[in-house]
Image: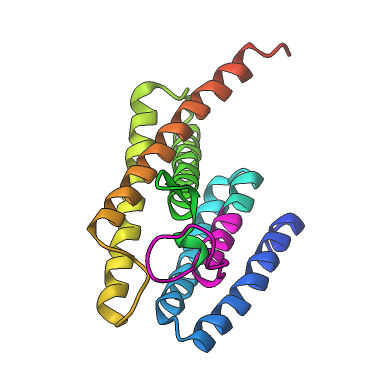
Amino acid sequence: MRGLLSNEKTILLVTMLYIAPALWNSFASGKMEFVIYVGVMGVLLGPVLWLHHQVRLHPLALWGLSLWGFAHMCGGLVHVPESWPTEGTSSVLYNLWLIPHRLKYDQLVHAYGFGLTTWICWQALKAAFQKSGVSVSPTFGLLTLCAAAGMGFGALNEVVEFAATLLVPETNVGGYINTGWDLVSNLVGCLIAAVLISLFDRRSQVRPS
């Protein structure tokens, strides 16, 4: 914590404030899959801090990661009224249809999270070039690489969920169709992020000094 800025300390504190009750709730409700997810989040915290130390990620990216974790914890632990449209046997936020039979909360979180991951990959790639004295713009090829990296991290998330189904008797992961829509949502989020990166880069270039 010594080398972190006060803003980063706030982000870490906020993240810890929702992880602790989420972990307690997971144990109390017997949702061991979320105990695994909280453990994975704890493991990922180290690499994220290391990457931030190397790259100096945009503050919005750090807050975005914290919000993503919060949305994930709420998705599996917050129950919605049974009268609300949901899919599956559990009336949790993850199963809620935001647009009936078109868009679920789960899919929105996937698109947001791996779109954010694509942006972080771009920041890391750009910083790597800058350390070599090369200034780069978000070309089609580089953005394709970043979007592919975001999709790769999304696939890794599905591996973690698959491991949860093997380790825990009952989960809310869903079946093959759910996994397919998760991957589609990841792709949509990564593509939107790539387009936004390109658009904001162009705006910054034409902005008068």
**Residue 64 coordinates in the image, percent (x, y):** 59, 50
Residue in the image at 33% along x and 79% along y: 170
Tell which residue pokes out farthest to the right in this image.
6
At horizontal 73% and vertical 61% (from top left) the residue drawn is: 10
Write down the quadrant of residue 169 in the picture.
bottom left
Q: Quadrant of the C terminus?
A: top right
Q: Is residue 120 magenta?
A: no
Is 21 situated above or below 129? Answer: below
Answer whether residue 89 is magenta in the image.
yes
Residue 2 seen in this snapshot:
no
Q: In which quarter of the image is the N terminus?
A: bottom right
Colour theme: rainbow
- Asked whether 192 or 13 is in front, the reply is 192
**Is residue 140 toward the left or the right of residue 132 in the image?**
left
Seen in the image, is 122 located left or right of residue 7?
left
Q: Position of residue 138 (x, y in %)?
A: 45, 25
Residue 90 in percent (x, y) is at: 43, 71
Residue 77 at what x, y percent from top left? 53, 72
Magenta segment, which residues? 65-91
Q: Residue at x 44, y 81 (%)?
A: 31
Does 157 appear above or below 169?
A: above
